[in-house]
Image (tube, grey):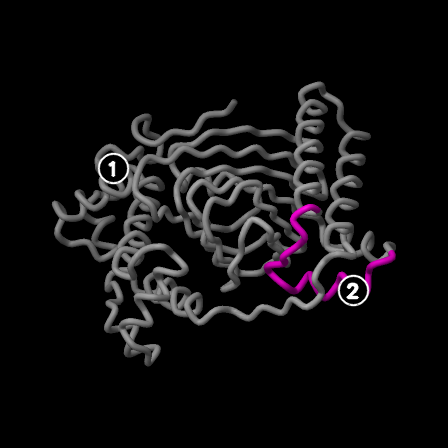
Amino acid sequence: MDLTVEHFEDVHLHAASVHAWEQTYSQLSPGLVRSSLCQIEGSRFQFFRERVNQRLVQHGQAPRDRVCFALPLSSPGSACLQGREADDSSIFILGGGDEFLFHMPQGLDLLSITFDRETFMQTLDESPWSGDSRQWLRQPVLRLPERRLAHARQRLLQLLGRSIKDVQGAMQGQAEEELERDLLEELICLVADPEFDRDQRHASSPGSYIVEKCHQMTLNAPQVAPSVIDLCERLRISRRTVQNSFRAVTQTTPVNYIRCIRLNGVRRELLGSQPGELSIGDAAGRWGFYHLSHFAADYQALFGELPSQTRRAGGTSGSRRAAA
């Protein structure tokens, strides 16, 4: 097993450090980022805990040939995965290769476990609950009894703590097999719990669909930011519907959400390039910011630093990451 523990001051560096996941994190709430990531990897599973103090939207693709679960340890606000609203009584499920859009509340503390799909399905088939449980693996959000979920959180945290000690104590081989077996048992029992409400077939909310379309429009044409009028005309809905949808799903306005997505796009450009390869002005222009003084002010308001202070590829200043 491999263990890494890192702390970050940038969500983009954090996202890039989650092994095997193709994803981007975009910061939506203003202020400096404080986040941590603890990862344990075996040959057929991944077990990690991440904590982020800012509100984010995650967009990407789950690892192929995997089954992915996540349990919030602390969720101080509403969350939304694949258009389904979630709270701290929910767990999240993604299939291997699934594209996802996940709106994370500010201050989320999340445990995630991914299994080799073949191993997981074989173990599930050997359990007494195979028939009932398979259908729930297609639901991205499941709500569970609070008492059962609290027990699962406690058990998984114990397993995380134990496995950290095993790795630090150079206990490999048998410890990895035991951890994989314990994680499989806990997750399969969780979705097969007899108190689990079987009548859960939640459709995507209209508000989430509107936000998702706006998000995709922004990424598809970054140099021309969509306006609220564009959204209204494209989706044939009222301005009030657009405003209410963004308030419910993202806790902000559509104008600010679009600006944040574009500012995060510039930040990724800067982090991934050297000053001699790409100027700040050119990076801003790629995302539709042409008035550089306004852009710099917006950038500083969101990230807590000027674009010139952002660490470039190979640089030493600005946002940092550190192993613990």
Task: Point out which mark residue 318 bears.
Answer: none
Residue named by callout 1: 275
- Mark closest to the chain's N terminus, 1 or 2: 2
Q: Is residue 301 left or right of residue 125?
A: left
Residue 85 coordinates in the image, percent (x, y) = 51, 60
User: Based on the displayed image, in which of its 4 quarters is residue 150 positioned?
Assistant: top right
Q: Is residue 105 above or below residue 154?
A: below
Element type at mark 2 = helix
Give the extent of the magenta segment.
128-147
Seen at 33% across and 72% down, the residue is 241
Seen at 65% across and 44% down, the residue is 113
Q: Amino acid at mark 1?
A: Pro
Residue 206 coordinates in the image, percent (x, y) = 44, 71
Residue named by callout 2: 132
Q: Is residue 108 left or right of residue 177?
A: left
Q: Is residue 169 left or right of residue 90?
A: right
Residue 322 coordinates in the image, percent (x, y) = 45, 25
**Was residue 135 drawn as part of the magenta stretch in this picture?**
yes
Q: Real-space Cα distance between discs 1 and 2? A: 55 Å
- Viewer-closest of 129 and 27: 129
Seen at 34% across and 32% down, the residue is 319
Q: Is residue 2 left or right of residue 121?
A: left
Seen at 45% across and 38% down, the residue is 52
Q: Is residue 1 above or below residue 271?
A: above
- Viewer-closest of 211 and 318: 211
